[in-house]
Amino acid sequence: MNILLCGLRGFMGREVMALADAGYRGAKVVVGVDPMADGREAVNTYKSFSEIPASAQVDCIVDFSHHSAISSILEYAIDKGCAVVVATTGHTESEVFEIKSAAEHIPVFYSGNMSLGIALLCELAKTVSAAMPEAEVEIIEKHHNRKLDAPSGTALMLAEAVKESRPEAYTNLGRSGHGKRTSEEIGIHSIRMGNIVGEHEVIIGTQNQTITLKHEAHNRALFAEGALAAAEFLVKQPRGLYDMKSIVSSDEKSAVAKV
């Protein structure tokens, strides 16, 4: 499986390179794209897609760069007919529209979080909130002080999972001001400090009991593993839009058991 890695020189790019070098999921990074490329990278790396030779053989693009790069990534992928794993977050509405439109032509994997554990957390949150319709739901997410977007894409994923069983629900980001909490409200609170890799907590409670669901990422390799597992899944799929839920619910479930 030949991978084109966007953001090769970043934190997550280095994690993907390390896994690929170890042969994880049969992935091989054959091309890199990074505006900071200086010629000292372990694979042929270019500052832009226009510099990549036409002879490059790519099965899947793994994007760990910046959300603003998505247009050029999708344009190249559609031209080459290869799959794309979008592992960045913080996309604007117009960028999300581009991602969904691209899925009409190629397989696209788009998820607010590359962790199988988070996919399972979403399912649990949906199940519990449906079983306890009278319960209030709050989401707390914690990340390192360098993260740019808030709330995290994962926190929004969790809120959307709850909304599947509560269509009337809405999110309240970083509650402030005066006024009583409504029963339809899903509070999302963001914490940015230190070097926290990622923690997400869903609190579902009534007057008499509370259930707390929590996922903690111990290191960034977790997300690199998930991205390469997604790539392995995606290259076998027809055009369309996929996410971690697609993997969990598919016949390929056993293929990601080690993530």
Image: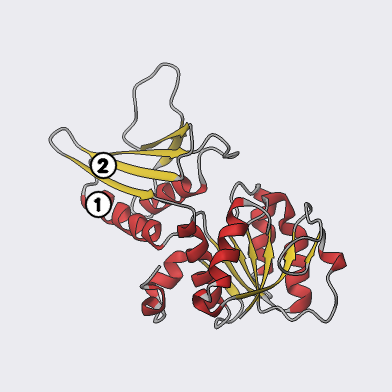
Quarter of the image where one finds residue 117: bottom left
Q: Amino acid at mark 1?
A: Val
The 10 Å Cα crowd at callout 1, few under 14, some 14 to 19, many 20 or more, is some
Residue 169, quarter of the rendered image: top left
User: Image quadrant for the N terminus?
Assistant: bottom right
What's under tag 2, amino acid-wise?
Answer: Ile
The location of residue 195, given as percent across then percent down, is 48, 38
Q: Earlier in the sequence, mark 1 or mark 2?
A: 1
Q: How many marks?
A: 2
Give whichever of 137, 5 is nearer the camera.
5
Image coords of residue 135 (percent x, y): 24, 40
Q: Quadrant of residue 211?
A: top left
Residue at screen point 74% across, 81% down: 57
Label placed on residue 204: 2
In the rendered view, would you say 122 is above or below 22? above
Q: Which mark is residue 94?
A: none
- At x 46%, y 34%, the residue is 190
CA distance for labels 1 and 2: 8 Å
Q: Is residue 64 above or below residue 20?
A: above
Taking the image as shown, residue 257 lies to the left or right of residue 197, namely left
Give the residue drawn at x 42%, y 39%. Answer: 141
Q: Residue at x 52, y 59 (%)?
A: 111
The secondary element bearing badge 1 is classed as: helix
> Is residue 151 found left or right of 2 in the rendered image?
left
Question: Under tag 2, what secondary structure?
Answer: strand
The circle on residue 128 is 1
Local crowd size for mark 2, using a 10 Å CA cut-off: few (<14), some (14–19), many (≥20): many
The reply to whether the C-beta atoms of the residues labelled 1 and 2 are less than 8 Å apart is yes
State whether residue 59 is above or below residue 148.
Answer: below
- The quarter of the image holding the C terminus is bottom left
